[in-house]
Every structure is written in structure tokens, then in C-alpha cells.
Amino acid sequence: MENLDLTSSPWIALGIVVLCLCLSAFFSASETALTAVSRARMHAMETGGDKRASIVNRLLMARERLIGAMLIGNNIVNVGVSSFTTVVLVGIFGDAGVIYATLLMSVFIIVFAEVTPKTVAIIKPDQVALIFARPVSWIVMLFTPVVFAVEAIVKLILRPFGVVIGENQSMLSAHDEIKGTVDLLHREGGVVKSDRDMLGGLLDLKELTVEDVMIHRTKMRTIDADLGPAEIVREVLASPYTRMPLWRGTSENIIGVLHAKDLLRALDAVGGDASKLNVQQISFLPWFVPVNSSLSGQLKAFLSKKTHFALAVDEYGEVMGLVTLEDILEEIVGDIKDEHDVAVQGVRPRPDGSVIVDGSVPIRDVNRAMDWSLPDEEATTIAGLVIHEARLIPEAGQAFTFYGFRFEVMRRSRNKVTSLMITPVKAKEAA
């Protein structure tokens, strides 16, 4: 039987090339769409009874097998169409046909089989994934033995280098994936900064501890329980807070917590005569929690105990600060102010791009206010970050540059850095 002379049958040759390019485009679009598809939307559609979404979810559960099948199919088609085109053009143009085939197929594959289908798939990943779900599932079933063989070879190659590949393992946790998605959507303009901060704060609750958000004991507003009842009433009325810790002997010896509403009720019961009050009786026992408790756990404890106030203690039982339900909620929704709060101006941007920051301001608050990403793993406050990096307590006027910012100490009080000027290095160079 005579061999088919493709050089004399240009339409057959053209048809084979077009078919191979269409298959290549199918593989490219399918791979891009299925890796970019919204798993949450597919789950919701599957729950609603969409069979195509169910197929997509099954494919995504075996992501490595899916990607392997798509890559194998795409490479087979691309190599095949390139080899076929080379044979045809060599038969027509001789040895120069190799060059023509290389140039021609490079353009066709890049434009029509890679960039165009992937662009469409990335713009509408859900729609493309649903359209191609069933044929992709058939191809995955067809190539599964080949994929397993390739995976085994790859594992053997990588094992001497200490790279262990687990089945369907993910390099990111679910929280990291969500945060990464939210950050990406924010950069693309799909999520506003306030929503990104709120979602990020909610996801960070498990990673943060009470120590990260508590009011340090040096800033706690407390009342000496040995004061007279009238003085205690004046202290409570002068305070912007509704709950005040009571101490006796030393400020670390907290014996109770006085609620302003309980005090007013008791004062009304004695006809407004403060001298008849027994402050110890109307205060409630303090609740002590470890400073290393996670914020998510502390939030649940607040809700179950139906209280908003706790004192944080270290491993030796020493009071280190206090934490409230509002402190935890502020990690999610941002700073909460009411008509009785004292406005503390801790972050003051300047026209030249620098920022004057009080040393006691938490790093997370500065990052949220300025949209920065200063690390907060080793220190809680801005002053703590500078001291940690400098390995000393700097003097006023000293400056340090790290993490892309210049930190200049403006004021120091005894052993505390009270004020700093932070300047982004790029902004400083531009100025």
C-alpha cells in the first residue's frame, strides 16, 4: 500500500495542523481554568445540584493528577503538530523547511494554542471549567496510568535531593490561601483596604496571643482599694473606662474589678451618700488568663463566660496587663472609638512622607494605618522592634535603617523610646 503523500494533499495537512492546535488550546484553557476556578463557587453549585460542578470538584481533589494529565496531553499534541509540520514543509522546501516549520509553529502555538486560550480561561475560569469538565475527566482517566508512571519517576529523581512529594499536599494552609487571595484581589482593585484588613484580622486571630493586644500594666488605669469610697467614686467618674481594677498594697496585687454601672446602682441605693458604700462588696473577682492564650480562644472564652474583661498573667502569675473583648474586636474591625474614649494620636504622617510614631504604638496598628508590612514576630510595639533590631536601647538622635525604612529616635525617657520618626527609604531618597 502506498504511503499518503501529505505534500500533495495540502487540505489534509492543514486539517491535521488545525486539529492539533485546537487540542493544544483545549489543554491550555482547561489547565488554566481548573487551576484558577473558584472552589467556593463550585462547592455552592454542586450543593445546588450542578453535575458539572461536581465533576470539577472531583478533578480538583486530585489536582496533581489533573495537572499531570493536562501537561502530558498538551506536550504530546504540541510535539506531534511540530513534527508533522516539519515533515510536510521539508517535503515542500527541502532542508529550509525545518526553519520555516520552527518559526511558523512557534507563532501558531504561542498565539493560538497558549496565550489566547489561557487569556480567555483566566478571564472566565468558572465558565470555561464547567464547559470542559466532562471531557477533561475522560482525558484524566485515559492518562492516569501514564501520570502515575511519570510521578514515580519524578519522586525517584527528587528523593536524593531531600524533596518529598506527598499526595495532594498543599504548600499553603487554608488560612494562607485565603489571605493570599484577598491580598491579590486588593492589589487588583476587587477588595477595598478596609475589607482586606478586616478579613486579614479575622484570619490572624489564631496566630495572635493576648500579649499582642493587651494593655500593658504600665498603661493600666487602676484604683487603690484603700482609698475612701468618695475618692473611688471620683476616680471612676474621671475614668473613660467602665471597668476599673482594684489593688491593695501594690499595684500588681489586683483584688477585684469595679464596674461603673454597679457603683452607680449601689450609690443610688444609699441615697447618694458615698460614705456608706462598701466598694469591696460591689466589685467582682478578677479573671486571670495566660498572656500566651490565642486570641481566637480568648474570644470564645469571653463569649462563653459572658464577660468583657480579663487580666493577663505570665508563667509566674505576675499581672502583665489587661485584655478586653473590645481589644480583640479591634483586631478585626479596626480602632473602635466612642464619645468617652481618649483620643491618642500615636501615628502622625508628615507631608514629606515620614511618620511620627509613639514608641508604644503596636506594629500591627502602624501596618494597618500606613499599609506597611513591618514584621511583628519578635516585638509588639514600634519601640520594641527598633530595640530588637539595634540590640540596644538607642539614644535620641540615633537612626537605623532596616526592612526598607529609616527609624530615627526623636525622644527617649529613661529606658523607654517614646517617639520615633519612620521614613520609607524610597520616600527619603526622593525627597
Image (spheres, grey):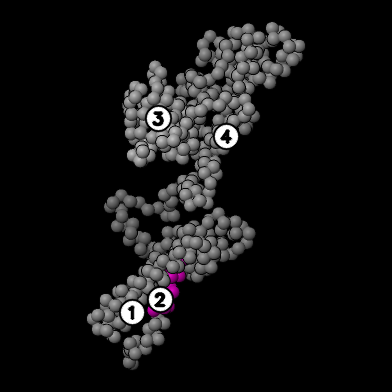
Label 1 element class = helix
Query: Can you identify the residue that label 3 sits on?
Result: 421
Amino acid carrying label 3: it is Met
- Report which quarter residue 28 is drawn in: bottom left
First reached walking from the N terminus: tag 3 or tag 4? 4
Q: Position of residue 56 (x, y in %)?
A: 52, 62
Category of crowding for the residue at label 2, using alpha-carbon neighbours closer than 10 angstroms: few (below 14), some (14–19), many (at least 20): many
Q: Is residue 97 above or below residue 69?
A: below
- The magenta stretch is 17-29
Q: Position of residue 166 (x, y in %)?
A: 40, 52
Q: Residue at x 45, y 62 (%)?
A: 32
First reached walking from the N terminus: tag 3 or tag 2? 2
* Quadrant for the C terminus in the image: top left
Q: Tell me if 189 is positioned left or right of 12 in this view.
A: right
Amino acid carrying label 2: it is Cys
Q: Residue at x 64, y 29 (%)?
A: 306
User: How far apart in space, not on screen, are marks 2 and 1 (Cα)?
Assistant: 10 Å
First reached walking from the N terminus: tag 1 or tag 4? 1
Query: Can you identify the residue that label 4 sits on?
Result: 329
Label 3 element class = strand
User: How far apart in space, not on screen, are marks 3 and 1 (Cα)?
Assistant: 67 Å
